[in-house]
Image: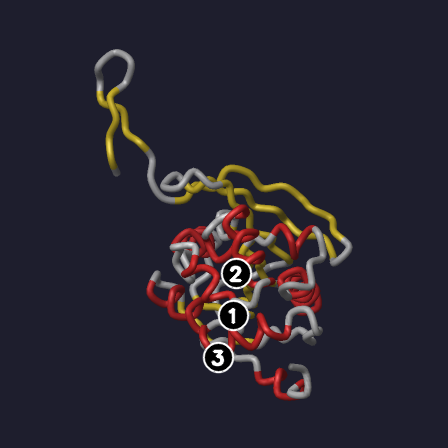
Amino acid sequence: MTEKVGVLGKKAPQRTGVERVVNAPLPTVYGKFQAVGYLDHDRGDEQVALVYGDIGTDDVLVRLHSECLTGDAFGSQHCECGDQLASALRAVAAEGAGVVVYLRGHEGRGIGLLAKLRAMALQAEGLDTVEANLALGLPVDARDYGVAAGMLQDLGVRSVRLMSNNPRKREALVRHGIQVAEQVPLLIPPCENNITYLRTKRERLDHHLPHLDAVAHWS
């Protein structure tokens, strides 16, 4: 914990880590969730975990979902994010218990909204998603999952069945003290607008996307 000087010259503690702030019922089209709101004191981001049912502590069905305004809100077909979010919420409700951690500050794999749009413009000119980020002088993936692990730990979760195709999410959770009992595929049927993006994720970012083989005819 770090300290800062108060208005009277006294040192006041500055909070670090993640703090639970509020718990509110959230009825959705997928079912009745509890929205548990957190403040990340290290980055200043406001975060939320959508909790369904009595989750327990072990082998909890969990999705770590990176914020994606274009996909989650606007229905962009450039990625599969919106469909993955909807599928994860449906899966948790069908399971009867689980958590969807919605991670703000992860837009564009952590580079921010405007930078993501700039990268998308470069992709429209022929670069892939990795090349576009690098052309902008930005990291390929700047996301950190420490806050997600902190939120899960606050909820009492010790091990998860992680809905993800990304091995780096599994590695990050384990590194932060959350065990991953199983990695559950979250495969969304591709379309012509996102097939190149998805192939890049598989070939250059090691995402497990075996269903892409069925659309090998798309160039």
Residue 14, percent from left and from top: 31, 31
Which of the two discs, 1 and 3, labels the residue nearer the N terminus? 1
What is the secondary structure assignment of the residue under circle 1?
strand
Residue to which mark 1 is pinned: 162
Mark toward the viewer: 1 or 3: 3
Few, some or many residues within 10 Å of mark 1 (<14, 14–19, 20+): many
Residue at the image position 72 percent from the left and 57 percent from the top:
75
What is the secondary structure assignment of the residue under circle 2?
strand
In the picture, the disc for residue 122 is none
Q: Quadrant of residue 78?
A: bottom right
Residue at the image position 55 percent from the left and 76 percent from the top:
184
Check if mark 2's residue and mark 1's residue have beta carbons within 8 Å: yes
Which residue appears farthest toward the top when viewing the image? 8
Residue at the image position 37 percent from the left and 67 percent from the top:
174
Residue to which mark 3 is pinned: 203
Residue 157, percent from left and from top: 46, 60
Query: Is residue 116 rendered to the left or right of residue 178?
Result: right
In whole angstroms, how far apart are the C-alphas of marks 2 and 1?
8 Å
Which of the two discs, 2 and 3, labels the residue nearer the N terminus? 2
In the picture, the disc for residue 64 is 2
Few, some or many residues within 10 Å of mark 3 (<14, 14–19, 20+): few
Few, some or many residues within 10 Å of mark 2 (<14, 14–19, 20+): many
Query: Looking at the image, is 153 positioned above or below residue 196?
Result: above
Residue 30, percent from left and from top: 74, 58
Query: Looking at the image, is 218 positioned above or below residue 26?
Result: below
Mark toward the viewer: 2 or 3: 3
